[in-house]
Amino acid sequence: MKDNDLLRYSRHILLPQIDIEGQEKIRNSKAVLVGLGGLGSVISMYLVSSGIGEIVLIDHDEVEISNLQRQIIFQTGDIGKKKAKVAREVLQRLNPKVKIDTYVGRVQKCSASLLQGASVYIDASDNFDTRFFLNELSLKNGIPLVSGAAVRFEGQLSVFNLKRSSPCYHCLFDSSDYRTEENCSTNGVLSPLLGVIASMQVIEALKIIADFGTTLDGRLLLFDSQLVEWTTLKLKKDPKCSVCQVTKGKTNL
């Protein structure tokens, strides 16, 4: 590691749980981030500033004026531009040494080469179709999934598919149970809440990459911003899960 890098990441390196070895792991890692909205914009900035070696940004959408209340990577002059392209320019200025790949479109149609070889998948999307797809992709490729969501005043996050014994996203949320979706567009969201959940997602991703601390594998973390209360629920692998198991069944908490 060069002197400039030692200085740039010195606050990480000072932490004995990370040190130079952990920072090297971060530098040699690749993250795939799906969604550049309220969660993804924050996640991308922290990952790049933390020295991630490579990041793949996936988003199909354009910047709208209503995004600016919470998607802090964008500015008024970006309205009408593709989120992934704008984010790449901002992040490249933030840390020129990070390799940044982009895909303007939905992750379901993304090139397999961009999705392979990752250290972690990070779900910052706002719909169940994408979340279920990422879960299956995570299982197929053996890559852990950090998932987060926030709406109104509440947020949640967890880590899925870290080990063979880990529950998958479908163990918690059965796709057949969801007929309506709640998102920011229809229900609103407190803007800084997204920063809280996104920051926690980055912490989980860095713990996986640099191998320190205890992840949220097997746990669902809930946050109520009105009460300022955190709640942790234990998750179990569903032996009848139709995605990570052979037979189909309901979810277990």
Image (tube, grey):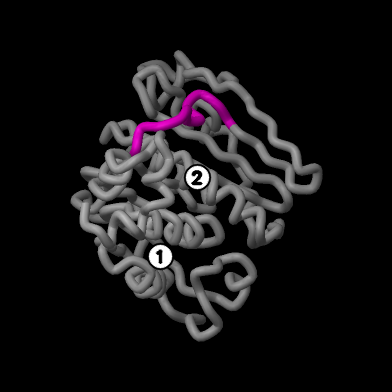
The residue located at (35%, 63%) in the rendering is 105
Q: Out of 45 and 161, give the one closest to the viewer.
A: 45
Please, what is the three-letter code of the amino acid marked with disc 2? Gln
Q: Position of residue 92 (x, y in %)?
A: 33, 70
Q: Residue furthest top?
A: 239
Q: Quadrant of residue 133?
A: top left
Location of mark 2 (residue): 201
Residue 228 vs 73, above or below: the answer is above
* Residue at 49%, 69% in the rendered image: 73
Alpha-carbon neighbours of circle 2 within 10 Å: few (<14), some, or many (≥20)?
Answer: many
Query: First in sequence: mark 1 or mark 2?
Result: 1
Q: Position of residue 172 (x, y in %)?
A: 54, 28
Q: Amino acid at mark 1?
A: His
Range shown magenta: 210-220
**Quarter holding residue 21:** top left
CA gap, disc 1 and disc 2: 21 Å
Q: Secondary structure at mark 1?
A: loop
55, above or below 12, in the image: below
Judged left or right of residue 166, residue 236 is right
Q: Which residue is mark 1?
A: 60
